[in-house]
Image (cartoon, rainbow, N blue to C red):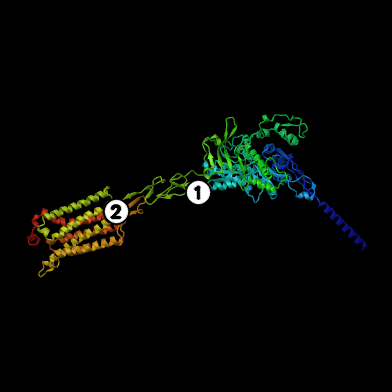
Amino acid sequence: MSTQKQEKGWALLQVLLVASLSQAEESRCRRRGDPENPLLSKDGNIMLGGVFNFHSKWNDRMENYMHKPKPLQCTSLNFRGFQYAQAMLFAIEEINNSTDLLPGISLGYKLYDGCGSIARGVRVALASVTDNEITFAPSACNRAAQIQAIMVGTSSSPCMAIATVLGPFYISMIGHIASCACLSDKTKYPSFLRTIPSDYYQSRAMAHLVKYFGWTWVGAIRTNDDYGNNGMAIFTETAQQLGICLEYSVSVFRTDPLHKIQQIIDIIKASTSKVIVTFLSLTDLYMILQELSNHNLTGYQWVGSESWISDSQTATRDKHRILDGAIGLSIPKVNVSGMRDFMLDVKPLNSSSHELFAEFWENVFSCKFKKSESATGNQRECTGHEDLSGVQNTYTDMSLMSLFYNVYKGVYAVAHALHNILKCNKTCDNKVQLDPFMILQHIRKIRFKTKTGDEVYFNENGDPSGKYEIINWQPRENGIVDFVSVGLHDTSLPADKQLNLQSKPLIWAQNSPEVPLSVCSEKCPPGTRKVLQKGKPVCCYDCLRCAEGEISNNTDSVTCVQCDPEFWSNERRDACVKKEAEFLSYEEIMGALLTAASLFGTCMTAVVAFIFFRYRQTPVVRANNSELSFLLLFSLTLCFLCSLTFIGRPSEWSCMLRHTAFGITFVLCISCVLGKTIVVLMAFRATLPGSDVMKWFGPAQQKLSVLGFTLIQVIICILWLTISPPFPFKNFKTFKDKIILECALGSAAGFWAVLGYIGLLAILCFILAFLARKLPDNFNEAKFITFSMLIFCAVWITFIPAYVSSPGKFSVAVEIFAILASSFGLLICIFIPKCYIILLKPEKNTKKNMMGKGAPKSS
């Protein structure tokens, strides 16, 4: 028992000892991992940080998780990173030498190498805002950051990672090449600002540029990162709104295997589009160019983003002239006085970082210093006094001065914010406690002009305004490419004035002066409309000719427009022409013939009337109520003349006149014939012994009967004209390409009542005449009336179906023909036989012959 108690006591003592040691250990803050030292640094009253890719690659490490990982070893010196860093140092030196901006305050800096790695970028960014002490007191853990703002010289993806980590601390980060539109989201990246426009503007500007040149069928290649994917997504969305279709959209990344690159080449080979829109980083573009060169694929029109369109290094690498004639957007060119000379003077780096200077110098002049570990016996020895001004390489190339200027503006933005915070005039208030959030707020609000005259400010998303130059690659005879500015795109202007191309000659793919054509289907000319091809994008379509009566007067019309009722499409279907108005006119042959027939009938009736009047005392004229005969001739004259009202352009009065005149005159005519028929019957009855019927149907009764029958028709016509009269009407339905001007009946019942009444009288007359057909030969007028009524009824019975089925002016002609035919039938059948007797057989024109007392007929 005592032994167990003793063991428990030792165990308790050990636990207490460990706890006390742990408590002592936790009383100090300890940094995890190895410290990160800046490649370039300089002390100052206020420190600025910088993350630049001095190197573009790193050596892969095999981690076994058994030992602590070694620090990342960066390789492949990146001259562009050097240039960005030098631009920052130039701005800081200008500010430190200025008496107007931050007087009495010196800016220092710590510049770190991101190596093109996202993880390392985050690591060195964190290191820049903390100390490199391994352990320190707990009170130091909460102290303010040494770095007040960071210049981030990396692409979009590393910037997003850095901004995500440092955002909660509100440490201002200003980027100059990270253009991804996603970085405008202030909920995710509250402390990130930039001096390069957002790709939201660039992507939309590229879509409008493509649309401007009429390219509606394009291919797209993008880098498979935040820059490429977001930029191409905005371009695709805008392109769809503008009617541009993407035949293909592929992504590439520098680590992709060769077979994936080959797949992209195969897609380009099989495509029909001749324009390739790119959102590519330089490294990925070089990979594509190499493969295109291997397959000798040229003749494509390239549209580039700001990442490569004005980069002379890209033009140098394009040995097979694949990109000749490329067009794209670039940050506007600028010339900052003194910057070029400062950047070419790199010897001061030797005192700040001899190791970095040595690596830079050895890469530029392909030599080795004696103390260099990598020096070999075959390489030339560096003296350190070589002349950099005579070197032509990426570092001495100033084609990206606009991007260096972005770094310059970023440093000045921080300086102006500090100037306002420290309330600087001739001196600054050094007692002001700087706070990262305060600095961020002031940077967001600053608005100043640089020495070049450009105004610098940030919008609510931390972005500058979107202003781009339009660059065209124009190769010279010596093989050098000129980056010619041919226009400008400024998003601060109204939408219709943002894109402005100058009247400069452009060079296109394969050095062609003509704008290349890249469409899935040719434009549909006026007179046709687009019909989408099944299963293909909206840019692929067939051109279908507009139907009759429809037109399209624009190129690439989606629909055809129906012409107004009074118009019709022309032969080309690109314009509406006024329809021909059709009506029975006096000028046309049919109208002239009918007019002639009408006038001939009128003249013929007048001649008959003249004959009857000349021989009015003869028995033939007097035998059957000469007054009715003259009234009948008068009504026949009106019948012939009323047909003329049907000819000519219909008007309101002519429409009412033609039908009523026709109805009344024909009833008057038939009434006279009916009276004559009754007279014949009565005259025969009167010859019978004891008959006194003639006293009931004498001349007075005959006139009253004609008046009564006619009055009924007049009443019908008055009712018709009062209730719903005929009116002129434009008929668009009978013929598609003509307007039929006709008289609408108004009331169909009125028309058929008029016609039916005429038919009723005609039938009654026909029946009575038929009954009197077997009277003695000398009273054979009844036979002629029967025959005339037979013709009259036959004409009007056949008129009905012919009238209904005849189109347009032919229905009017049918009605006129019926009027004339029936009128001629009455005239010829009733009066011509009498004229024959009067003129050619006067011996029969005696009372004795009319009374039937002549010689008997021979057997």
Mark 1 residue element: loop
Q: Earlier in the sequence, mark 2 or mark 1?
A: 1
Residue at the spot x=65%, y=39% of the render? Answer: 408
The reply to whether residue 785 is in sight is: yes
The residue that label 1 is drawn on is 533
Amino acid carrying label 1: it is: Gln
Q: Gap between marks 2 and 1, in whole Å?
A: 52 Å
Residue 92: x %, y % from top left: 69, 38
In the displayed structure, 773 sits above or below 614; it is below
> Which label sits in the foreground, 2 or 1?
2
The residue that label 2 is drawn on is 651
Give 801 or 342, whichever is nearer the viewer: 342
Relative to 189, 628 lies left or right: left
Residue at the spot x=36%, y=54% of the render? Answer: 733
Quadrant housing residue 756: bottom left
The single residue placed furthest to the front in the displayed view is 426
Quadrant housing residue 325: top right
Identify the image quadrant of the N terminus. bottom right
Residue at the spot x=90%, y=61% of the render? Answer: 5
